[in-house]
Image: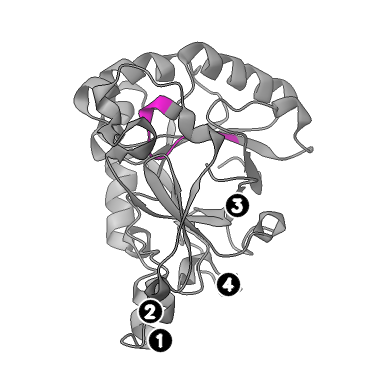
Amino acid sequence: MSGVREYRYLGPDGEGIAGLPDGVGVALGSEYCVHLLPSAARMAEAVREASARGVPVLLLTPYFRDAELKRAIPLFRTIPAGARIDISINDWGALRTLHGLFPWMRLSIGRLLSGMKTCPRIGVSARLTEEGRMWHGEGIFSSPRARAYLEETYGVAGYHVDDLPWSRPARDDPDREADSPFLFVHVPHAIVTVSDACPWIGGASSASVASCPRPCRNGHVLLREPTMGGDLLLKGKARFTSRDPGGIDRTSPSGAGAVVTYRDLP
């Protein structure tokens, strides 16, 4: 992996790379909407800017319909072989396609596929034992057999997780085993769920429009319900929960891994 311990999210297009602190990588793209991916031209420019700074890139990608994935291929073609970049994958079809077309790319399993459960009700439920609560923080990254298959078949090199009280993998662990997976720990906003219908374009599917002016970038909506145990934050097609607004300054886990920090909702 890159060796960088922090990636900072700079929006869908990765603007502001020149202003990053030394040694901090850039994260860009989107885990939940194809219209929040950078253009092919901007992707190529971002890779050049990061290379000039000597820092790696983390590209976040969403789930794709077949036609959307086909239209996105030029974006991946602009990434030169050997570039210091990791691609976060949130679609099994995209994983197979990208590994087949670009076998040199470092691919990691994104938060939508990791299997971790992040609903804030988990933290306050009286029906869960502590062991049951911790089970909800596990995922495919917890299975050596699943990790071995994904690594051997698709070259998967890491997993994206959220930093939650019941997420054992995201906690600092001095007894971390040598064969434990490389984790990208996202703070402070955990992604809870994703919808196909986007409220910012009248509840229509984002697949129903050829392009989007990205109105969701102008703010978010607070969703509050007494039984939740915490507020949900709606932005675009995704709902988030923010555990610790000050968590953007935390250091990465003591084991192998990196932290992905956000100044605002992605």
Left or right of residue 237, residue 81 in this image: right
Q: Does the magenta stretch include residue 7?
A: no
**From this viewpoint, is residue 29 visible?**
no
Residue 173 numbered tag: 4
Q: Which residue is located at x 29 percent, y 37 percent?
A: 203
How many labels were placed on the picture? 4
> Who comes first in sequence, dot 2 or dot 4?
2
Q: Where is residue 112 in the image (x, y as percent from the top left)?
A: 35, 49
The residues colored magenta run 27-35
Residue 133 numbered tag: 2
| Local secondary structure at mark 1 | helix
Coloration mode: one colour
Residue 259 numbered tag: 3
Between tags 4 and 3, which lies in front? 3
The reply to whether discs 2 and 1 touch (Cβ–Cβ < 8 Å) is yes
Q: What residue type is labelled 1?
A: Glu
Between tags 2 and 4, which lies in front? 2
| Local secondary structure at mark 4 | loop
